Image (cartoon, helix red, strand yellow):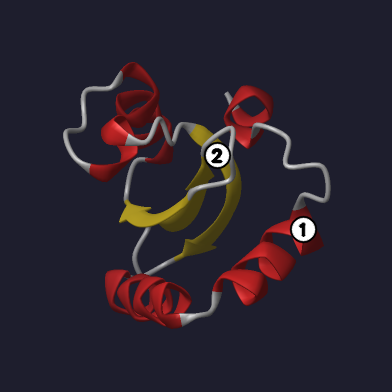
Amino acid sequence: MSDKAYYVYILSSFNKVLYIGITSNLRKRIWEHREGIVEGFTKRYHVKTLVYYEIYDNPETAIKREKQLKRWRRDKKISLIESMNLNWRDLYKELF
C-alpha cells in the first residue's frame, strides 16, 4: 500500500457543465483549473468549482474509477454529486 493519495474529482461550471479528472495533488490541480492555467475544456467552459471527489491509495484503482465515471450518463453523475454535496457547494473552499 502506498502512502500517496490519488483523487478522482468532478468540477462544475456555473451552468453545471461537468469535468472529471484525476490527480495526486488535489489542492494544486484544482487551483490550476481555477486560475485558468490548464488549457482545454475546463478553461474554455469555465469549469472551476470542485463539487465531488474520492480518495484512493493506488493510481490503478483511481484511473479505473475515473474511466467508469466518464462513461456514466449525466443524470447518474448528478446523483453521485448530490449524494455528497446536495447544494453543489465549492468543496475547494471548505478543504483548503
Where 16 sits versus 7, above or below? above
- 19 left or right, relative to 95: left
Q: Could you tell me residue 14's position as x and y percent? A: 59, 32
Most distant residue in the front direction: 15
Q: Considering only order in the chain, which callout, 1 or 2, is on the residue closer to the N terminus?
A: 2
Q: Residue at x 46, y 31 (%)?
A: 48
Where 84 sits versus 13, above or below? below
* Quadrant housing the C terminus: top right
Q: Amino acid at mark 1?
A: Glu
Residue 18 appears in view: yes
Judge the density around disc 1: few (<14), some (14-19), many (≥20) Cα neighbours within 10 Å.
some
Q: Secondary structure at mark 2?
A: strand
Q: Quadrant of residue 53?
A: bottom right
* Quadrant housing the N terminus: bottom left
> Alpha carbon of mark 2 to alpha carbon of mark 1: how far?
13 Å
Q: Which residue is disc 2 drawn over?
A: 50
Q: Could you tell me residue 10's position as x and y percent? A: 50, 52
Q: Amino acid at mark 2?
A: Leu
Q: Could you tell me residue 87's position as x and y percent? A: 82, 42
- 29 left or right, relative to 88: left
Number of numbered labels in the structure image: 2
Where 30 sits versus 74, above or below? above
Q: Residue at x 42, y 67 (%)?
A: 57
Most distant residue in the top direction: 35
Q: Could you tell me residue 42's position as x and y percent? A: 33, 39
Residue 5 appears in view: no
Q: Residue at x 35, y 81 (%)?
A: 64
Most distant residue in the left direction: 39
Q: Which residue is disc 1 drawn over?
A: 82
Judge the density around disc 2: few (<14), some (14-19), many (≥20) Cα neighbours within 10 Å.
many
- 96 left or right, relative to 21: right
